[in-house]
Image (cartoon, coloured by chain):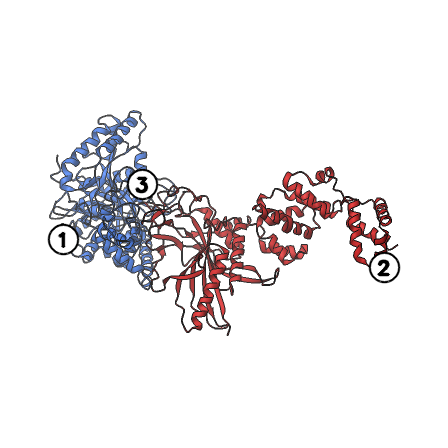
Amino acid sequence: MLNSSLLQLGAALRSKEISSVELTQLYLHRITALNSKLNAYITVNEEMSLAQARAADVQLAQSKTHALTGIPVAQKDIFCAMGWRTTCGSKMLSDFIAPYDAHVIEQFNRVGAVNLGKTNMDEFAMGSSNETSHFGNVKNPWNNNAVPGGSSGGSAAAVSAHLCAAATGTDTGGSIRQPAALCGISGLKPTYGVVSRYGMIAFASSLDQAGPMARSAEDLALLLNVMAGFDERDSTSLQRETEDYTRDLNKPLNGLRIGLPKEFFAAGLSADVAQAIEASIAEYKKLGATVIDISLPNSRLSIPVYYVLAPAEASSNLSRYDGVRYGYRTPEYTNLADMYEKSRAQGFGEEVKRRIMIGTYVLSHGYYDAYYLQAQKIRRLIAQDFVEAFKQCDVIMGPTTPTTAFNLAEKNDDPVQMYLSDIYTIAVNLAGLPGMSIPAGFSGNGLPVGLQIIGNYFDEARMLNVAHQYQQVTDWHTRTPQHIEV
Amino acid sequence: MQWEIVIGLEVHTQLSTSSKIFSGASTAFGAEPNTQACAVDLALPGVLPVLNRGAVERAIKFGLAVGAHIAPRSVFSRKNYFYPDLPKGYQISQFDLPIVGQGSLTIQVPTTTAGQTYKKMVRLTRAHLEEDAGKSLHEDFHGMTGIDLNRAGTPLLEIVSEPDMRSAAEAVAYAKMLHTLVRWIGICDGNMQEGSFRCDANVSVRRPGAELGTRREIKNLNSFRFLQQAIEYEAQWQIDTLENGGTIQQATVLFNADIGETRAMRSKEDAHDYRYFPDPDLLPLAIDHEWIEQIRGTLPELPLSKQTRYVADLGLSVYDADTLTSSREMADFFEAALNEVPKEAKLCANWLMGDVSASLNREDRDITQCPISPAQLGGMLKRIADGTISNAAAKEVFKILWNEGGTPDTIIETKGLKQMSDVGAMEAMVDEIIAANPMQVAEYRSGKEKVFGFFVGLAMKASKGKANPAQMNEILKRKLAG
């Protein structure tokens, strides 16, 4: 059952082979057994999950079902879910019970999926290792000394260790793809605007995008079918025809043009990862694809641009956490300014404070033009690189990360080294393009390698097709870590 | 040596949408604290703003009314600062790309001579959309501050003028004209007590012809009287300071209405760095030509156009035209009444500005609450114009219309208020009066013309006030002449 695809689980539920309550209990049981080790979940609420499972069983009995009815899905703790504690990985919101549902949560509720719990994450999604979480770091199921990646590290670890059937994540600079790669699962960041941001706690609004994390491209397609769609409550949500993202899964790849950006295979890429990626490209050639060398000349500027723009937006987005209306307030203060200062000093962690300071600085009078405006200009150049590239190819491929999972605490003292782990993913967010990561082998020390597939705007169905066809001829995505038996 | 006062105004007008600028919560005034603040207004984690189309339409309407350029693309920016009544820690406003560009407003400024005005054009720099903050309540909280977020997110149009005004009187005339205009085009209720129309005045002084002086900004003036007092005090303070060898520091000041003085609140040094940047949650606001034209089609005739027309076509004085266009309701009332007596604009204006206004004032009503309809007033004026009733009788008719209603013709009929115009009967009355008062007749004929009034009184009394005064006078004069 644990190795089943979402389609198989759905079939089992509909044929009454298993009930949603039983399936939910199975996962809750595993979470009880393994979460103390992995720390993938911040909040589990058996009562609320089982209530949803019971409701799903009623729906299943009446045959009023959707592909995901009754399926337990873990939700990144960045999505507000009514009645659920929603912390965003921060002390600031450690006691915050969301009074409303995010669009993504609504969509899953609408089809009768079960919210299995809220997964751990870097504080306010700021981090690449899940170590900035107020609720402790998450361990990589493949090696408990290694990080799971971040910021959606809890979701990635939960999918990898079979602590849920599937999960959600959000990706501002690689936060779905990087942990998916490091934990050996599949993850998709859609085109900016495809999934509504309503109720998703903002980090950097112009970059944040929610997406699915699961064990296969096929599962991702089913999840994206639920998550995507226009929402008038998000002004950046795009009004488009509803798509079935599974529609092209089985198309052959004959004639597919794969662009390989030379910048993604240059210095900094570890040999293990390079080898696995080259092997997977060879696999694609066997499937009928052709390979084209391309260049994304401005992508080298992605990290500096990102670390101007994302903190700038974050410094403003996080101003609402002031201790006045909800969230953490310092117990002792002498006046208003003191209350603000202490509440924010005590409620936010180091990385969040670092980014608020960077953001505040780059927006300051006299620096705005030099930093923020300049970064916006380069952002357009980076996006233009992709426009040019997609004139020559259908998808772009490369490594998701320069290395496999690094060790816990390895990069804590050097923020820039930490930031560099997102070097291949950030440009995609800056351009607003869809990107995904799928398992593509292992390094010599047994850690998963992720293959990144970048598509043109709204080309998610084609990307899923490209990933699915690969997963028909390889079995990397079916491998599971050891020591996750209960 | 002379000083010239230089004034520019920033006016915040609350737009009359039923919901807020970025959320669906109600904007109604006076609800229990925090009952009209939804998740978006409270800035809960994860919420997003969605622009209210009605607020945009009102801003466009204003832009068209002042002949301004409507930006085809404008941008919402975040103005970042911490304050407890600012839930997000930033205000969504417009910074370098506002929705309304340069325009102008023509004002009539009263002079010291009663009834005399001069015309002046004030240039508008821009007008932009933004959200209001909530309210901090410092009373009744035992040393703490209460926060009411009902007002948070209420749509505002901030209208900024050039420093074109040269006296408090000009500033007040401008503010009044703007106040009239925003109500005229229906984008703001203009309620100053409730804060729907608030003025900030930038005041500086200089020697005529010199560079602009350093300005101080007087914040939050919510009545025309305070605007006048604050500017007068501030300008005098600046002149005194300069004449005593001091200098003016740029500052934000508050006007204390109780003592009639302005006092510095913060200087330029501790001004905020608002760290403006485009709000990534909102797309740039695109306004196409069609939308603008569609809104242009809904614009009523504007006060200035009516004023010009009243003077040129109806022969009214500038003062009358100005008064009649003080509100759209007043102008509508005037035109509807005039419709009954198209040739009697002056008569109509006199009654509206005279008896009607006086009666409304007495009962503290405005023109929309007038118990007499334009048709009733016009119907009565028609009877004055065609000589059916005298002015004295008209006052009687007016009183009955005001208190009891009815139609003028019926009232004239039932109360017997018709003027007498039977020349034979009037001549007979005059003959009788002359016969009965030989002494006074002799006096008159000997040149004492004052006695004429005595005869008029008798004649009107004899006719029970119904005689047509002009006709009666003519008969008296003829008969007395002998």
On screen, residue A272 versus residue A241, left or right, reads: left
Q: Chain of mark 2?
A: B
Mark 2 crowd level (few <14, some 14–19, many ≥20, 10 Å Cα): few
Circle 1 residue: A410
Displayed quadrant of residue A308 = bottom left
Mark 2 — residue?
B446
Q: Are marks 2 and 1 in contact (CB under 8 Å)?
A: no
Which of B198 and A100 lies nearest the eye of the viewer?
B198
Please report, as a chain letter, where disc 3 is located. A
Give me the chain that's red: B
Distance of mark 2 from mark 1, alpha carbons? 126 Å
Which of pointers 2 and 1 indicates the residue nearer the eye? 2
Say which residue label 3 marks.
Answer: A102
Badge count: 3
What is the secondary structure assignment of the residue under circle 1? loop
Disc 1 from disc 3: Cα separation: 35 Å
Q: Please give left or right for residue A398 compared with residue B65 in the image.
A: left
Sequence-first disc among 1 and 3: 3
Residue at the (62%, 59%) spot, across then down: B115
Dot 2 lies on which element?
A: loop
Chain under disc 1:
A
